[in-house]
Image (tube, rainbow, N blue to C red):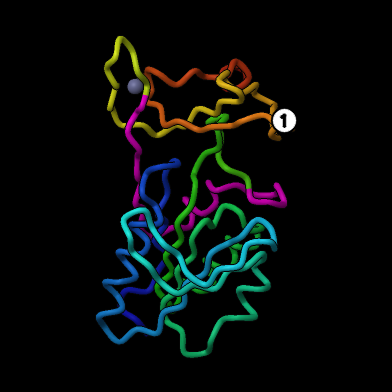
Amino acid sequence: MLTESGLTLIAGTMFSGKSTELLRRIKRLEASDYNIQLFKSKIDDRYESNHIVSHDGFKEEATYVMSVDEMIANLKEDTNVIGIDEVQFLESEVVQFCDQQAKDKIVLAAGLIKNFQDNYFQFKDEKLDMSELLRIADHLVYLNAVCTYKENGHRCRKEANRVQRFVDGEIAPFDDGSVKVGGKEAYQPRCRSHFVQYQDVLNRLESRL
Ligand SMILES: [Zn+2]
């Protein structure tokens, strides 16, 4: 039994350095005698890679998986540290997987906590969302990006825990789940003051009070 077993959730917005933090923690554990396995979810099959590289130049070998079943199939018997990057792209079963594995292993899961609507990110089967990993996590690392809003030539630079989605330079409509053909989408970190909140989200909150 590992004294440090448990689930650490590295949650945050885009551009907040989640992968870097995951790899930093993996590197630290590597120095001890842990048997580490690193997984990264992939959205489709076209992309072939066996490494996670962070913006800061950290590089680690990783198994790319499309499902929780694939992760389980690849899990080695003597593994005692599991790292998962982009955990939000897996299915809802990943919650149960993390909960089970964290009983006797160190599990580090990094992922996007919210989507561009500022709602909890849903797993790909849309049954559960990232709040379920928050609920079961033993440790939480919550990372913010820096607001890139610009006014009169000055950048805001406040802590940003939201991301605004733009399509062709305009704020994306609330229910615009897909990218338009030929459309150019972009995401920018925003602080509380500069994030343009969707009326749908405000209405939903209002209706629950
Ligand atoms: Zn700002």
Q: Quadrant of residue 182?
A: top right
Q: Can the viewer see residue 209 in this picture?
A: no
- Looking at the figure, which quarter contains the N terminus? bottom left
Q: What element carries label 1?
A: loop
Residue lying at 55% horizontally and 29% vertically, measured from the top left: 165
Q: Picture coordinates of residue 201 (x, y %)?
A: 59, 22
Provide residue 111's location: percent of width, then percent of height.
48, 52
Q: Which residue is pictured at 51% across the width and 54% down the height?
A: 133
Tag 1 residue: 180
User: Label 1 crowding class (10 Å Cα cut-off): few <14, some 14-19, many 20+?
Assistant: few
Residue drawn at x 58%, y 60% as measured from the top left: 95
Figure check: 103 above or below 52: below
**Quadrant hosting residue 67:** bottom right
Locate residue 90 relative to residue 4 in the image: left or right.
right
Type of amino acid at the residue the image marks with label 1: Lys
* Residue sticking out furthest to the top: 152
Nearer to the camera, 83 or 182: 182
Report whether 111 appears left or right of 73: left
Q: Quadrant of ligand 1?
A: top left
Q: Give the range drawn in magenta.
A: 123-148
Using residue 141 as the reference point, say whether residue 77 is left or right of it: right
Q: Is residue 39 visible?
A: yes
Residue 183, horizontal then vertical, whole percent: 67, 29
**Residue under the image location 70 percent in, 49 percent down:** 127
Residue 28 part of the magenta-drawn span = no
In the figure, 25 relative to 146: above or below? Answer: below
